[in-house]
Amino acid sequence: MSIITNLTGFMADRMCGGSTRKLIAGWWYSILAVTFLLTMLSFWIVSTRQPAEAFASVWSTIILILLSVGGTMVMRKFHNSFFTGLFIGGIVATAQYFFLLSMIFGGYAVDRQYLGYSGAGDYFQAAVAFIQAILLGSFAMLLTAHRSEIMDRSSNLHKSGGGSGGASGRKAEDSFREVDDGGDIDGYNPPAMG
């Protein structure tokens, strides 16, 4: 992991003034841009292709939109280790899915050429899916190497137990402290052993 950390540190120095958070955000925005392009391609595929290819395109768009919304929420609000790990796992799975999709769309292009049709649209979609797979895979490595940049311990999520602060956040924190201090849970006291 040290090689990846050194490489991303070098990239952050060159492109983002030394800020790995800006590098992570920029990489994420490039993934969102390719997601938008694939969404537009999906509309075209649905109107011009067979149902199987249209379904694959629409399903990949739905997965990308869900990943985009969930990833943006993790990057902006839910900075704990569970959601960051879930996000990284989702990115790895989606990267593998888009690699497979690029091969499938390439196969569709070959089939269309064999039947005497133009396969240029399918080759383009295969290339964009492959670029998305590379972006997602490299983003997963980047995020794994710098996950501590995402898991910010000074956020409100960690200060108040999930709330936005105020009395309700303090109340939740106090109830956790009571359980940690040896208090019973919901009035249940286990019987003494012996």
Image (cartoon, grey):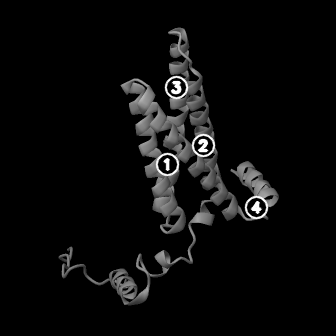
Instruction: Name the residue beneath numbered marker 1.
Output: 89
Q: Which mark is residue 16?
A: 4
Query: Marks 1 and 3, how far apart in space?
Result: 24 Å
Residue at horizontal 50%, vertical 24%? 104
| Alpha-carbon span between mark 2 and mark 4 | 20 Å
Residue 118: quarter of image: top right
Q: Which mark is residue 105?
A: 3
Name the amino acid, label 1. Answer: Gly
Crowdedness near tag 1: few (<14), some (14–19) or many (≥20) residues, C-alpha within 10 Å? some
Nearer to us in this view, 152 or 124: 124
Q: Give the amino acid type for the residue marked by disc 2 in the picture.
A: Gly
Task: Name the kind of residue labelled 4 in the image.
Answer: Cys
Secondary element at image label 1: helix
Residue 181 position in % (x across, y down): 36, 84
Which disc is residue 57 wearing?
none
Q: What residue is shown with label 2?
A: 137
Front disc: 4 or 1: 4
x and y, in percent, of residue 128 in the image: 60, 35
Question: Residue 60, position in %: x, y?
Answer: 45, 39
In the rendered image, the residue lying farthest to the right is 14
Gap between marks 3 and 4 measured at Cα:
35 Å
Which of label 1 and label 3 is nearer to you? 3
What is the crowding at mark 3: few (fewer than 14 residues within 10 Å), some, or many (at least 20)?
A: many
Q: Is residue 56 left or right of residue 118?
A: left
Task: State the CA–CA distance, disc 3 to disc 2.
Answer: 19 Å
Q: Secondary structure at mark 4?
A: loop
Label 2 or label 4, whichever comes before in sequence order:
4
